[in-house]
Amino acid sequence: MPRHFQNVLTTQQRIAMLAQRSPDFAFFSLAHYIDLEWLEEAYRRTRKDGAAGVDDVTGKEYAEHLHDNLQHLLDRLKSGTYKAPPVKRTHIPKGTKGETRPIGIPTFEDKIVQRAVVMLLEPIYEHDFHDGSYGFRPKRSAHQALEEVWRATMDGRMGGWVLEVDIRQFFDTIDHKHLREFVSRRVRDGSLRRLIGKWLKAGVLEAGALSFSEAGTPQGGVISPLLANIYLHYVLDEWFEKQVKPVMRGKCRLIRFADDFVLVFQLKYDADRVMAVLSKRFEKYGLSVHPAKTRLTDFRSPSHPDRGRNDSSSDDGQPGTFDLLGFTHFWGKSRKGDWAVMRKTMKSRFARSVQKIDQWCRRNRHKSIREQWKELCAKVRGHYGYYGITGNIRSLGKFLYQVRNKWRRWLNRRHSRSSFSWEKFQSLLERCPLPIPKIVHSIFKGK
């Protein structure tokens, strides 16, 4: 284990202990911890295979003179002359209708600096963030958030009322003034605050044009998720835990992964009260709730004693469904015949995954069958790695069926004449089998 890793870990533990002992303490001196060893560890934790930023320097090129580059970077950081470069914006496909979404690509060196700052701030905020927050945090994952949602809705096998909330363009509308104020509650170090300010003002370069915004966080950078978590910690999490929960009549829980979150209530009365004030709460801090994508769902179990009364929001008296983190949640019967919360792949995510496989097969049909098979196996396993949760085996089987269809289709188009009948393709699958559906994340593990 590298010596600089141990030194960084020791410093982080010291910061974390101080943050834990003094929840209201503001750190005035942190930047001095960033030395050459700290930057070396930040470099080690930074992805080396990402796309180059506005300076066109790749991770491999930066590593050719690594020690000199890091020393020069440290000198600029210590003297205050480091300038945050603009973020290069590009667009990637979104969904299945030809839509795209923008992503930002910082320079490789800027990624190192952002990682170094995250390594300083993370130990502080990990003791501040609430248990219901799961996104972009150490040792936390989307599957843990999904399991928490499952447990919240399965509480007593009765379910409840689920408030789905969509924050409109959250990462692009974070108010800089409020963000600086939130950061200053725990971090008063002038050097770090100036660095964060430089990133907020760095601008975006797209198609040769440089633009600046008065709102939003640095796109694509490792600092952005942490700043977003800090923002929602004060705007939503703290407010919910300290002001909302104490005045609720029944149980309620908040489960959040970055800007995706749901609120689960035992009583509709409580859900209506929170829904009525949530928009005003967000507007106070420059955020807005998407009215069409924010809804209250009657997610009480079909066996709930109050099911069918006038307070049900479902027209047919049956529980509704809601979507979170790529899964549709609904009530179904378990193998034992009991009502239980089930999850399946969202239709839009399923269609997007199949489309990606289809596009990959089309682009790579010139490769040998053996090469295609190896890469397809990796992609199918990757799909199972995320969507392979308890109760979703049927969706995994449908996905495998579609992958086989797409593969055969494009193998047939390698030549002007169709060469793969179903019999011949089945023979191929016997020699080169694709991975069978597998549940990777089980709610029953550890019980």
Image (cartoon, grey):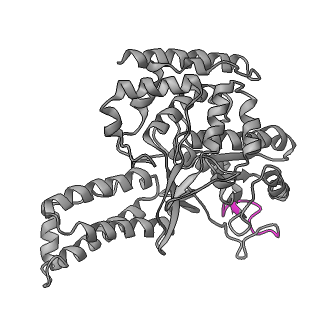
Foreground residue among 203 and 148: 203
Foreground residue among 80 and 139: 80
The quarter of the displayed image where residue 165 is located:
bottom right
Left or right for 284, reference 168? right
Can residue 326 be seen in this snapshot? no
Taking the spot 41% from the left edge, 30% from the top edge, the residue there is: 43
The quarter of the displayed image where residue 36 is located:
top left
Taking the spot 62% from the left edge, 65% from the top edge, the residue there is: 321
Can residue 335 be seen in this snapshot? yes
Foreground residue among 126 and 332: 126
- Mark count: 0
**Residue 428 locus on image (x, y percent):** 13, 67
**Residue 373 locus on image (x, y percent):** 20, 60
Q: Quadrant of the N terminus?
A: top left
The quarter of the displayed image where residue 164 is located:
bottom right
**Residue 363 locus on image (x, y percent):** 26, 68
Considering every residue shown, the one lying at the far bottom of the view is: 417
**Residue 288 locus on image (x, y percent):** 75, 58
Q: Which stretch appears magenta?
A: 298-310
Left or right for 33, reference 49? right
> Above or below — where is 402 with respect to 76?
below
Taking the spot 28% from the left edge, 72% from the top edge, the residue there is: 406
> Above or below — where is 32 with respect to 205?
above
Q: In terms of secondary structure, what is the magenta stretch mainly?
A: loop
Left or right for 6, reference 25? left
> Above or below — where is 233 with respect to 349?
above
Taking the spot 47% from the left edge, 28% from the top edge, the residue there is: 73
